[in-house]
Image (cartoon, rainbow, N blue to C red):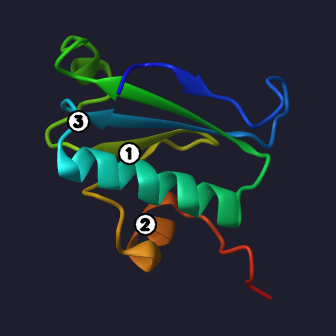
Amino acid sequence: MNSEHEVPAESDDPDVWELRLYVAGQTPKSIQALQNLQRLCEEHLRGRYRIEVIDLHKHPKLAKQDEIVAIPTLVRKLPDPIRRVIGDLSNVEKTLLGLQLVPANAP
């Protein structure tokens, strides 16, 4: 895992969600968190998201800027306000609620 960006969305689209996933190496929990995030984004934000994965083993100073105290942690940078969800993101309802994301199949 590295800090490469996945960019399925247009860069200057104001409706794009900017998500940053903080991990510590390629632990099973970190890998699961990324897989769960990708699945959630494809289902609920298709074409409107960017994911940046930050490995704190490689970039430890970046944890301070987003006040990371546990890993994995997902930070929603955009849209405002900033939101954080800690864990492997396996509980979809909790993750959607934490991100304040309305499910794609909601009426």
> Mark 1 and mark 3: span between their CA atoms?
16 Å
Q: Secondary structure at mark 2?
A: helix
- Choose between 82 and 25: the one closer to the eye: 25
Tags 1 and 2 in contact by the CB under 8 Å rule? yes
The residue labelled by disc 1 is 74
Q: Which mark is residue 95?
A: 2
- Image quarter where the C terminus lies is bottom right
Q: Secondary structure at mark 3?
A: loop
The percent coordinates of residue 77 (x first, y second) are: 53, 35
> Mark 3 and mark 2: span between their CA atoms?
21 Å
Q: Is residue 97 above or below residue 75?
A: below
Give the amino acid at mark 3: Gln
Q: Residue at x 66, y 71 (%)?
A: 102
Image-quadrant location for residue 105 = bottom right
Give the amino acid at mark 1: Leu
The percent coordinates of residue 1 (x first, y second) are: 35, 27
Give the amino acid at mark 2: Thr
Q: Give left or right: position of 63 versus 52.
A: left
The percent coordinates of residue 67 (x first, y second) are: 24, 30
Q: Residue at x 23, y 35 (%)?
A: 26
Residue 17 visible in the shown view = yes
